[in-house]
Image (cartoon, rainbow, N blue to C red):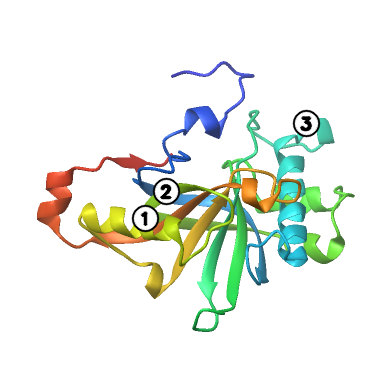
Amino acid sequence: MIKMMNEQTNWQTDEAKEYTHDTDKGSIVDLPTRGYITLSGVGNADPNNRDFIDRADALCKVADFLANAPENDLEVEGYTPFKRYPLQAMWQRVTPGRDAQWRYQLMIRQPEFITKEILQSAEFSILNVDQSYLWDIRLLHFSEGLEAQIGNVGTIDRRGRVNSKLQQFIRDSGYRSLAAEGWHMELYLDDVARTPGDQWHTILRNGIEPMDITKVMKRGVPIVEGK
């Protein structure tokens, strides 16, 4: 589909299969290397974790500033209108056990025309973000690769029902989860700073690899190729 020059790119409609919030069925995505603005921290994705919420809010405000570059007098070569992508976080376990501590990297995807130089220019103009967060925000390039995902309502309990459903989907589809060996991804489709935690619309993603090729082919779960 060809877009008109001033038509906004909208992930909710243009990439609906990648960002599906289906809480009943899992799906598989294969995501290429993309640019993300990032901000790291330690703790849990909890509405009561003030540091997590404040960092998430800061990153979203920077992403909103970049998405509205023309209105903010920020010159961006090749700019085309786009809806700000949702907040996501890559989580890595720091300590073992039920009360494990987690390290996270908050991420918000950026179009190719948002560069490190553009981010640096924006940081000198953004006034509504605490500088202790602002100067730690970086533009990095990262590939999520092959992942299984499933939707959820509320915060994600990594030992709860949503994770159990995802792991079952992965096994039934002939794959093996890589979450225990590295990291997993969570997406937050709502404004986490202004939405009660039990109303968050979230997506849980796990890296996967084929385990039973016969089952993979028999089940034939489609793979959504990211743009």
User: Which residue is at a point 54% across and 34% down the rendered structure image?
Assistant: 11
Chain-order first, disc 1 or disc 2? 2
Chain-order first, disc 3 or disc 2? 3
Q: Is residue 207 left or right of residue 134?
A: left
Q: Position of residue 142 (x, y in %)?
A: 50, 58
Q: Residues within 10 Å of mark 1 (few under 14, many from 20)?
A: many
Q: Position of residue 194 (x, y in %)?
A: 76, 46
Distance of label 3 from label 2 (alpha carbons): 35 Å
Dot 3: element: helix
User: Which residue is at a point 54% across and 58% down the rendered structure image?
Assistant: 156
Image marks 1 and 2: residues in contact by CB distance under 8 Å: yes
Dot 2: element: strand
| Badge nearest the viewer, 1 or 3 | 1
The residue identified by callout 2 is 150
The residue identified by callout 3 is 70
Q: Quadrant of residue 207?
A: bottom left
Quadrant of the rendering where the N terminus is positioned: top left
Q: Which mark is residue 166?
A: 1
Residue 167 or 72: which is nearer the viewer? 167
User: Which residue is at a point 67% across and 35% down the rendered structure image?
Assistant: 77
Distance of label 1 from label 2 (alpha carbons): 6 Å
Residue lying farthest to the top in this orientation = 4
